Image (cartoon, rainbow, N blue to C red):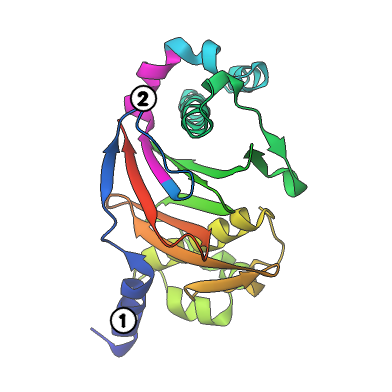
């Protein structure tokens, strides 16, 4: 292995975490509202379970949006994500899921009675993060055939491009950096930026819009990469498989 390859693999090892323990979560289990919780949800597994109760849980607006979706898989992901989010927030707030009310702040970032949350989904997975402080999460399916070279200059800094390397090395590097940027922007509430190349996400602690966030990146199975951005006081993360 070349020195360049060795250096890149060392950087992947420092950015990716493999030791997060995913515990099974059963509905009704008490959730500590002073901690950050991450829920991993399989769309294929849960859609058959929730589809009969959708009209009892989702709002009229959410049902209308789901009804406008023509691609069945997109509709299933949306319904599962909204259903589970309302269920989780209802448990945190001790109210029925259909009574959870959302407050929209700057850049349309929602909260629910002081609970911060964020959702990301792709393929068969939905990730939901809830926290007492700002949080952002992103998951991407690792497409090993994606030619990402065309967007490197407009999306990443020089150091990040050096870290990512080229397509012949390992596309995991690209998805590590992409999910970190997405998670940071979502945690900050901005969501979208025209200056992605100026937001460097190689460090564990990142200051953005006068707030400092802690970044963690991890694998979900072999072909899914995810990152989460939390505030510094959220030292302990709890990882749950929604069953």
Mark 2 residue crowding within 10 angstroms, few (<14) / some (14–19) / many (20+): some
**Left-right relation of 30 to 212:** left
Q: What span is colored magenta in the figure?
A: 38-51
Q: Which mark is residue 5?
A: 1
Task: Give the image location of residue 163, x and y in percent.
Answer: 44, 78
Q: CA distance from mark 1 to mark 2?
A: 40 Å
Q: Which mark is residue 46?
A: 2
- Residue reaching furthest left? 1
Q: Quadrant of the C terminus?
A: top left
Membership of 48 in magenta stretch: yes
Instruction: Residue 41: name its quadrant.
Output: top left
Label 1 neighbourhood size at 10 Å, few (<14), some (14-19), many (20+)?
some
SS type, badge 2: helix
Residues under numbered marks 1 and 2 in contact, where contact means CB atoms less than 8 Å apart: no
Residue 28, horizontal then vertical, whole percent: 36, 27
Q: Nearer the viewer, residue 116 or 35?
A: 35
Considering only vertical position in the picture, is 163 above or below 37? below
Query: Which quadrant of the figure contains the N terminus?
Result: bottom left
Residue 114 visible in rendering: yes
Q: Position of residue 238 (x, y in %)?
A: 36, 50
151 horizontally vs 4: left or right: right
Of the two numbered discs 1 and 2 on the same chain, state the one appearing first in sequence.
1
Going by the picture, which residue comes out furthest to the right? 106
Label 1, secondary structure: give it. Answer: helix
145, 191: nearer the viewer:
191
- 18 is higher (above) or lower (below) than 160: above
**Does the segment drawn in magenta span residue 216?**
no
The residue at the point 39 percent across, 41 percent down is: 39
């Amino acid at each position: 292995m070349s020195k360049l390859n060795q250096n890149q693999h060392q950087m992947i090892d420092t950015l990716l975490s493999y030791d997060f323990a995913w515990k099974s979560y059963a509905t009704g289990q008490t959730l500590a509202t002073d901690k950050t919780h991450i829920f991993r949800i399989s769309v294929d597994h849960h859609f058959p379970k929730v589809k009969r109760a959708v009209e009892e849980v989702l709002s009229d607006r959410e049902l209308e949006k789901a009804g406008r979706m023509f691609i069945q898989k997109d509709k299933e992901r949306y319904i599962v994500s909204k259903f589970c989010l309302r269920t989780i927030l209802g448990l945190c707030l001790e109210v029925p899921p259909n009574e959870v009310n959302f407050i929209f702040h700057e850049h349309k970032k929602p909260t629910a009675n002081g609970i911060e949350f964020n959702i990301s989904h792709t393929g068969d997975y939905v990730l939901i993060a809830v926290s007492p402080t700002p949080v952002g999460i992103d998951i991407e399916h690792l497409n090993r055939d994606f030619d990402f070279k065309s967007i490197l200059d407009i999306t990443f800094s020089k150091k990040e491009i050096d870290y990512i390397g080229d397509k012949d090395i390992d596309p995991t590097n690209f998805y590590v950096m992409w999910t970190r940027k997405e998670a940071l922007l979502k945690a900050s509430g901005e969501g979208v930026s025209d200056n992605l190349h100026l937001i460097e996400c190689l460090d564990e602690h990142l200051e953005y819009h006068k707030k400092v966030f802690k970044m963690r990146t991890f694998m979900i199975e072999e072909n899914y990469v995810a990152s989460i951005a939390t505030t510094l006081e959220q030292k302990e993360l709890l990882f749950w498989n929604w069953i």
